[in-house]
């Protein structure tokens, strides 16, 4: 009984704080304390300034040789591509409208690692977890963007788009901050105290602001349409994909923090960027919104369950 309670406490200590801040974002938006303009500006601030600062400070102050697991990152890339191929087959069988298949596939594999995933890892493992998750995030995010463009173009019978996506990736502030931090981490170069303290101020803003904006942007009215297709994508995102990746990770010998980072990043909800991409390509934006809402709420429970089981089995 004590082991059960310890596992339960451990799992909810990871997801509980995320739920509280997301719920606060929903309340503040409904109470009109924050509005759409705040969400838009706050999201841009997180993406362009505070999240890159958080990642740069964290990685630059840590020894990559001691903290990074390239085997984990490589597995994440291979497993993500394999999951993408599986979801393409699932969508062809279960989603009748061809135009919606790319939206369902993207929603099934594209995790919100930059906000929810990182928050999970920080709650679970602190600084070392943040470093391991940041390197994983950087490379897998590149693959996410490429695969998202491919699946949406295929389902909508469009050509091109990959070249533009590669240019966007090269200008992505998150990826640039990680790349810029790698020499400092590899060579153990110290940062000037002024830069370090200033960066820490921005870094400390990241997760609270990002989670408030995420909660405030949830649109529950969107759940009225395309429920069946959204449910297929949500089940894949919350249960099928994490179970496949975690099982593969266990088979390869991942344990402790490495397995935890893999589990938390793969069980994070669908990224909000998926909605932006679908809307920009004139796809079924309502379906994309459905998937984001369902997985954001569902992830709090599915992630708790996954971490509860892994902790109970002594794998973390």
Image: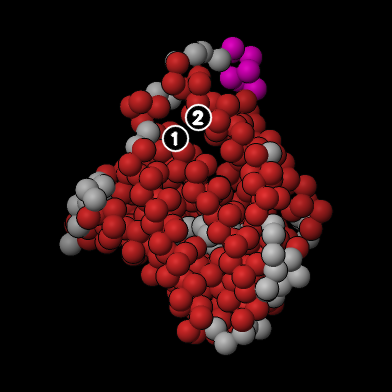
Q: For this view, does 307 lie left or right of residue 38?
A: left
Tag 1 residue: 131
Q: Is residue 132 above or below residue 255?
A: above
Front residue (pair 140, 262) = 140
Q: Quadrant of residue 54?
A: top right
Front residue (pair 109, 47) = 109
SS assignment at label 1: helix
- Residue 78: give x, y in percent of width and height: 39, 53
Disc 1 packing (10 Å; few <14; some 14–19; many ≥20):
many
Front residue (pair 174, 30) = 174
Q: Is residue 297 visible?
A: no
- Residue 184: give x, y in percent of width and height: 50, 19
Q: Is residue 16 above or below residue 169?
A: below
Name the outermost residue toward the right: 37
| Residue 193 on the magenta span | yes
Tally of numbered discs: 2
At x 49% / y 48%, what residue is drawn? 140
Per the rendered image, the range of residues in magenta is 192-198
| Residue 209 on the magenta span | no
Q: Is residue 28 visible?
A: yes
Disc 2, disc 1: CB below 8 Å?
Answer: yes
Tag 2 residue: 58
Q: For this view, does 288 lie left or right of residue 269?
A: right
Q: Is residue 47 above or below residue 84?
A: above
């Amino acid at each position: 009984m004590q082991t059960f309670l310890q596992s339960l406490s451990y799992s909810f200590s990871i997801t509980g704080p995320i739920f509280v801040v997301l719920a606060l974002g929903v309340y503040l938006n409904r109470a009109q304390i924050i509005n759409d303009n705040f969400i838009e500006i706050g999201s841009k601030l997180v993406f362009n300034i505070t999240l890159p600062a958080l990642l740069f400070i964290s990685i630059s102050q840590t020894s990559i040789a001691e903290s990074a697991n390239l085997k984990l990152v490589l597995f994440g890339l291979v497993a993500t591509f394999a999951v993408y191929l599986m979801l393409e087959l699932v969508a062809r069988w279960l989603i009748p409208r061809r135009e919606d298949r790319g939206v369902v596939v993207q929603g099934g594999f594209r995790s919100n690692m930059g906000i929810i995933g990182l928050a999970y890892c920080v709650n679970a493992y602190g600084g070392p977890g943040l470093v391991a998750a940041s390197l994983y995030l950087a490379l897998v995010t590149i693959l996410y963007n490429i695969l998202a463009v491919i699946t949406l173009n295929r389902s909508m019978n469009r050509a091109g788009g990959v070249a533009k996506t590669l240019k966007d990736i090269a200008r992505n502030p998150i990826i640039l901050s990680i790349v810029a931090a790698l020499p400092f981490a590899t060579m153990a170069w110290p940062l000037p105290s002024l830069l370090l303290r200033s960066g820490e101020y921005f870094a400390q803003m990241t997760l609270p602001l990002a989670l408030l904006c995420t909660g405030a942007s949830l649109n529950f009215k969107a759940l009225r349409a395309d429920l069946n297709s959204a449910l297929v994508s949500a089940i894949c995102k919350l249960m099928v994909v994490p179970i496949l990746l975690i099982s593969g990770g266990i088979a390869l010998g991942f344990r402790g923090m490495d397995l935890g980072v893999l589990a938390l990043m793969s069980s994070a909800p669908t990224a909000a960027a998926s909605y932006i991409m679908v809307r920009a390509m004139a796809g079924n934006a309502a379906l994309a919104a459905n998937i984001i809402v369902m997985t954001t709420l569902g992830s709090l429970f599915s992630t708790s369950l996954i971490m509860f089981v892994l902790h109970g089995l002594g794998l973390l």
